Amino acid sequence: METLISIFREVRDPRDFNAQHDLPAMLFIGLAATLCGGKSCVDFADFAAANEATFAEIVDLKHGAPSHVSERQRITVPLPDTADRPVYGAIHAVPPH
């Protein structure tokens, strides 16, 4: 898992400097939720909340589990035209609701 998280740390964060949740943590949770059948932002938030204690052992959750749609939208809407595009594209492919 550490290798996967280190790869996520290489992704440039398109959000403002005051984003509460760590981008690698959100990408990890999003991937885990997707692999477990999550298909929407609500699924991601529910999955993060239900597994918060487990995720806190793996990634930085100093502000708790990401719990709302706007956090994911701030990641996926400003898709940068960079080498990170495949990562953002995979996340953006999940419908927002």
Image (tube, grey):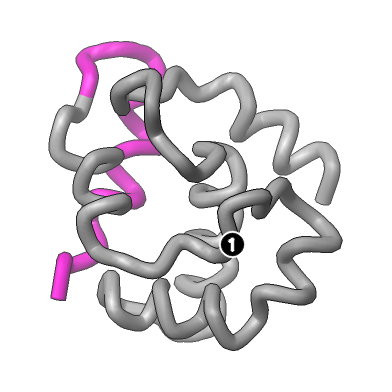
Does residue 41 appear to the left or right of 5 in the view shown?
left
Q: Position of residue 42 (x, y in %)?
A: 29, 79
Give, as a single range, the part of the protein colored magenta.
Answer: 80-97
Q: Residue at x 50, y 38 (%)?
A: 23
Does residue 62 appear to the left or right of 16 in the view shown?
right
Q: Position of residue 33 (x, y in %)?
A: 51, 73
**Disc 1 designates what residue?**
64
User: Does 4 sit above or below residue 32?
Assistant: above
Q: Residue at x 41, y 73 (%)?
A: 44
User: Does 71 sit above or below residue 48?
Assistant: above
| Location of residue 12 by image quarter | top left
Does residue 52 appear to the left or right of 90 in the view shown?
right
- Quarter of the C terminus within the rendering: bottom left
Amino acid residing under circle 1: Gly
Q: Which residue is farthest top? A: 82
Q: Residue at x 55, y 39 (%)?
A: 22
Q: Position of residue 47 (x, y in %)?
A: 51, 81
